Amino acid sequence: NAGVTQTPKFQVLKTGQSMTLQCAQDMNHEYMSWYRQDPGMGLRLIHYSVGAGITDQGEVPNGYNVSRSTTEDFPLRLLSAAPSQTSVYFCASSYSNREGQYFGPGTRLTVT
Amino acid sequence: AQSVTQLDSQVPVFEEAPVELRCNYSSSVSVYLFWYVQYPNQGLQLLLKYLSGSTLVKGINGFEAEFNKSQTSFHLRKPSVHISDTAEYFCAVIKTTDSWGKLQFGAGTQVVVTP
């Protein structure tokens, strides 16, 4: 199993550009989520999904969109990048809230 | 919503010395608790978890944690650290009745192990 994969590993955007961060898992997990990690702030939940076709907002959803058309994939879209979105983004998946989450390797995004 | 406080942002420790990382949470109801480790430039990896039962939980790499309901704490310990334990450690908590999206992470504790 590849586990949770994320692409790209690094990305530089200009303010106002849009892009999609890809996330895929091959463990047949129903639960998937996107976090951003900023120094001294831990991980903050952006959006999450409890199954194909079902998504919900987390703590910091503004400026981001998600959709989940399959169990395996959960892309995160930045609609119009802003410097405040400079961060490291992690995708995670799990069976349930009793289980630990499996994290991807992260995408480091810089918005200039 | 519950909150998680990691009391130390950075913990320097000498190789082969013990280390304790403190985690307190705010919730009056039953919770599940987790500790994760993040090595440099990597994603998070689960160290251990508390769901119910015995309050002393053993995890990978020689780590253990003790759940204290009265003090709402879940401190992580290792009796003898290695250089390779240099990493950031995150405590996380979720109420047992909450949906999966409500998992809350602490701000993290950076452990720096020196020879």
Image (cartoon, coloured by chain):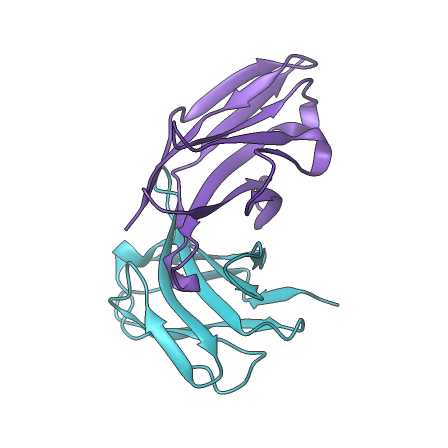
Chain colours: A cyan, B purple
* Vertical relation: A3 (above or below) B113: below
Q: Position of residue B64 (x, y in %)?
A: 63, 30
Q: Position of residue A1 (x, y in %)?
A: 75, 68
Quadrant location of the C terminus of chain A in the rendered image: bottom left
Q: Nearer the viewer, residue A88 or B28?
A: B28
Tell which residue pokes out farthest to the front in this image.
B53
Residue B51 appears in view: yes
For the point 24% across and 66% down, the residue is A62
Q: Position of residue A59 (x, y in %)?
A: 29, 58
Q: Position of residue A10 (x, y in %)?
A: 51, 59
Residue A112 appears in view: no
For the point 56% across and 23% down, the residue is B112
Drawn side of residue A81 relative to residue A27, left or right: left
* Vertical relation: A110 (above or below) B41: below
* Vertical relation: B30 (above or below) B54: below
Q: Nearer the viewer, residue B7 or A17?
A: B7
For the point 53% across and 62% down, the residue is A92
Drawn side of residue B37 relative to residue A59, left or right: right
Drawn side of residue A69 relative to residue A3, left or right: left
Please identify the quarter of the rendering in which residue A83 is found: bottom left
* Vertical relation: B73 (above or below) A19: above
Please identify the quarter of the rendering in which residue A33 is found: bottom left
Please identify the quarter of the rendering in which residue B28 is found: top left
